[in-house]
Amino acid sequence: MIEPRDIRLKRLTMRSMRRGIKEMDILLSRYADIRLAEMDDAELDLYEALLNENDQDLYQWVSGQKPAPDRFAGLIDDIGQTASAG
């Protein structure tokens, strides 16, 4: 069964808010609020794959402590830019 887009956006938004590390909750929930609705299916697939990554890794990638894997590099840059814009 194919998940309706509105349900998928709500699910990804909730997953963005409930990460485990408070800093990632804040960064990703803000990012989800700003960007998810404008993403196409392929971008949502990539974002969902990112949400499956470990919070410690995500935090190190977003904060620049470690480089993000190539497949996530553009998305991590966008999350970082969104975080610094606010």
Image (cartoon, rainbow, N blue to C red):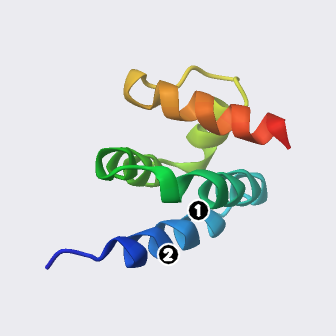
**Percent of width and height locating residue 47:** 44, 48
Question: Amino acid type of disc 2?
Answer: Lys
| Label 1 residue SS | helix
Looking at the image, is mark 1 or mark 2 earlier in the sequence? 2
* Residue that badge 1 annotates: 16
Image quadrant holding the C terminus, namely: top right
- Residue at the image point whose x is 46% and y is 69% from the top: 9
Residue in the foreground of this view, choosing between 78 and 53: 78
**Left or right placement of residue 85 versus residue 53 in this view:** right
Percent x, y for residue 50? 45, 46
Residue sitting at 37 percent across and 28 percent down?
Answer: 71
Quarter holding residue 60: top right
Give the x, y percent position of residue 41.
30, 52
Question: Which residue is label 2 attached to?
Answer: 10
Report crowding for label 1: few under 14, some 14 to 19, many 20 or more residues within 10 A (C-alpha): many
Secondary structure, mark 2, is: helix
